[in-house]
């Protein structure tokens, strides 16, 4: 496994972290190219929980980012101080980050993930539950507000804001929803849907898959064996 790009994501990157917050990391790695031709293809993802690290093989990462997956996408837009591993191919990935974007997929992904957070909130009732559940509810509410904010900005400008300019606003929203104001979360989601409908976007209808494919093929070429096969391996 050769790590191409990795960094700290999640609450630390957004500016929402508090003492004791988890530190989440995501990265892209390249498996040896010849490994894809054996009986057992390489793993596409490596996930650990202590520490919290998710690594995707370059091919899978490209597919996730092309689909608009918010977590995969944000790796290419991190503030410089959040990167922990950068290579030439990793920097090239950052350089083509706009090629992964398309208006329909950005809208569907960010609204879809936000709606998923809302369903988690709605399943917890009216706020009359334990302090631990309220904390988790507030966390889901912050994620909902953050996803909607980032998605609308990305859709309207073509730029993904990772570090939030006003993190306290998101904390306060999470606290209110955690205390039981589910209607505010519903209203925010409804407004975001209207905002997406009304916005003019610079994003194309389709991502630039040709540019992404070129990068991925260069990754594969860079991870071929540096020497030829022996005569016996070639069957000579």
Image (cartoon, rainbow, N blue to C red):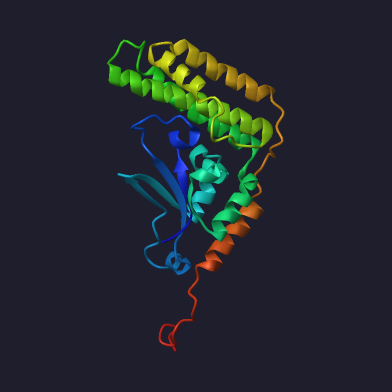
Residue 68 at x, y percent in the picture: 56, 39
Q: Quadrant of the N terminus?
A: bottom left
Q: Quadrant of the C terminus?
A: bottom left
Residue 221 at x, y percent in the picture: 55, 68
Q: Is residue 55 left or right of residue 97?
A: left
Question: Does residue 194 lie above or below 155 as drawn?
Answer: above
> Residue drawn at (52%, 37%), measured in percent from left and top?
70
Residue 123 at x, y percent in the picture: 36, 19
Q: Nearer the viewer, residue 32 or 85?
A: 85
Tell me which corner region of the image, top left, top right, bottom left or bottom right, holds residue 222.
bottom right
Q: Is residue 234 left or right of residue 195?
A: left
Q: Nearer the viewer, residue 167 or 216?
A: 167
Is residue 115 something that shows in the picture? Answer: no
> Residue drawn at (50%, 15%), measured in percent from left and top?
186
Question: Does residue 37 lie above or below 21 as drawn?
Answer: below
Is residue 208 something that shows in the picture? Answer: yes
> Residue drawn at (40%, 25%), measured in percent from left and top?
139
Tell me which corner region of the image, top left, top right, bottom left or bottom right, holds residue 35.
bottom left
Q: Is residue 57 left or right of residue 211?
A: left
Q: Nearer the viewer, residue 217 or 12?
A: 12
Residue 154 at x, y percent in the picture: 62, 33
Question: Does residue 198 lie above or below 210 as drawn?
Answer: above
All told, the count of numbered labels is 0
């Amino acid at each position: 496994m050769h790590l191409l790009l990795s960094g700290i994501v999640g609450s630390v990157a957004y500016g929402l972290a508090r003492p004791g917050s988890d530190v989440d990391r995501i990265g892209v790695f390249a498996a040896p190219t010849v490994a894809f031709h054996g009986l057992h293809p390489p793993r596409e993802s490596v996930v650990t929980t202590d520490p919290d690290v998710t690594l995707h093989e370059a091919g899978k990462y490209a597919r996730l980012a092309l689909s608009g997956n918010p977590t995969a996408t944000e790796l290419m837009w991190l503030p410089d101080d959040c990167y922990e591993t950068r290579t030439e191919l990793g920097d090239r990935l950052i350089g083509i980050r706009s090629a992964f974007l398309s208006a329909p997929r950005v809208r569907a992904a960010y609204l879809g993930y936000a709606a998923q957070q809302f369903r988690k909130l709605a399943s917890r009732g009216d706020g009359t539950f334990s302090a631990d559940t309220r904390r988790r509810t507030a966390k889901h509410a912050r994620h909902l507000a953050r996803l909607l904010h980032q998605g609308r900005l990305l859709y309207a400008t073509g730029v993904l804001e990772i570090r939030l300019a006003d993190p306290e606003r998101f904390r306060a929203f999470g606290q209110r929803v955690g205390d039981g104001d589910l209607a505010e979360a519903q209203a925010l989601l409804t407004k975001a849907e209207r905002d997406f409908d009304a916005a003019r976007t610079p994003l194309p209808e389709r991502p630039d898959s040709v540019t992404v494919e070129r990068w991925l093929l260069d990754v594969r070429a860079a991870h071929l064996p540096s020497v030829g096969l022996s005569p016996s391996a070639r069957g000579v």
